[in-house]
Image (cartoon, rainbow, N blue to C red):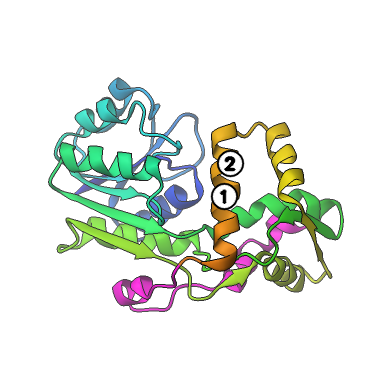
Amino acid sequence: MTILVTGATGKVGRQAVSQLHAQGHDVRALVRRPSGLPGEIPGDLTDAGSVKQALDGVDKVFLVWPFFDADNLAPVLEAISDRHIVYLSSSGEPPWALAAEALIEQATPRWTFLRPTGFAGNALEFAPEIKAGDVVRAPFGKMARPLIHEYDMAAVGVLALTEDGHAGKKYELSGPELVTQIEQVQIIGDVIGRPLRFEELSPEQAKADMTAAGWPQQLIDSALGAWAGMLETPEAITSTVEELTGRPAKTFREWAEDHAADFRA
C-alpha cells in the first residue's frame, strides 16, 4: 500500500509522513521543493496535473488542503479519483471546511474527516516576541481552547489510512484540557526557564496588526469573531484521540516541551 501526503512540509503533514515512514509504510510526500522528508516527490497541490503524476501507484491520500476556501479543489479530487481520502478538516464547521468535505463526498465513497480544534502549533506565532523579549501581546487572553498537538492529529489520520473501519467517519479531535492564551504563555515560560508575561490587545489593535501582517480582511473578521465567541463558549473537549489510539491526547505542556527550541533565541 502506497500513501500520498499533501501539505507534507506543514505541521500535521510532516508528522503524518514521519509516522507512516516509522511504521514501515510506503509513503510519498508531495513537496514543492526538497525538504529532506522520506519519500519526497516534487509537485504542486494547486496543479491537478502535477498531483495526478504524484498519484501513480498510490492507494490512499492524506489530504491537507492549506487554503481557507475550496476553490480549485475539485480538479485535484478528480485526479485523486476514488481512492480513500483522509482529509484534515476543522471543528466548528467553518464554510471552507464544509465546502471541501462536500466535494470530497461527491468525489469518492471512501473518506474520513478529521475535525480538530485549535492547533497547539499556532502558539508558534508567539515565538518572535518571546525571542525578542518577555512580553507576548494578543487579544482575548482568557480565551480557552483544548489545543491539540499535531502528533495526535497525524496519529488518528495514520490509523484511518492503515486500518479498516474508518471510512465514512467524521472524527472530532481535541486536546485533553482547556488552556487560555495567558496560560499558554506561562507554560512556555516554564518550559524554557524564563518568566513571560501576557499583555492584552484590544480587538481593534489586533485587527490593525493582522491587517499589517497581510491577513485577508474576511479572514480577520472571521477569526476575531470566532475568538470572541470562545470566551463564553469554548470548543468541546473530546476523548476521540484516546479512544482511537489507546493513549491520552498530549497536553499543551507536552507540546511546548517538544517545541522548546523554537522559543529560544
- Tag 1: Cα neighbours inside 10 Å, few (<14), some, or many (≥20)? few
- Tag 2: Cα neighbours inside 10 Å, few (<14), some, or many (≥20)? few
Residue 1 pos. (x, y %): 19, 49
Q: Quadrant of residue 179?
A: bottom right
Does residue 4 appear in this view?
no
Quick one: SS at disc 2? helix
Q: Quadrant of residue 180?
A: bottom right
Total tally of numbered discs in the picture: 2
Determine the CA span between mark 1 and mark 2. Answer: 6 Å
Q: Mark 1 points at which residue?
A: 225
Q: In the rendered structure, does residue 259 fall within the stretch colored magenta? A: yes
Camera-nearest residue between 169 and 254: 169
Q: Mark 2 points at which residue?
A: 221
As drawn, 125 above or below 57: below
Q: Which amino acid does label 1 sit on?
A: Gly
Tell me the magenta residue range: 236-265
Q: Are marks 1 and 2 in contact (CB under 8 Å)?
A: yes
Residue 248 pos. (x, y %): 42, 78
Quick one: SS at disc 1? helix
Residue 87 pos. (x, y %): 31, 48
Residue depicted at x 15% and y 64%: 165
Q: In the rendered structure, does residue 255 fall within the stretch colored magenta? A: yes
Residue depicted at x 41% and y 45%: 38
Residue depicted at x 58% and y 70%: 252
Disc ID at residue 76: none
Is 191 on the left or on the right of 96, as rendered? right
Residue depicted at x 28% and y 44%: 101
Q: Which amino acid does label 2 sit on?
A: Asp
Camera-nearest residue between 252 and 263: 252
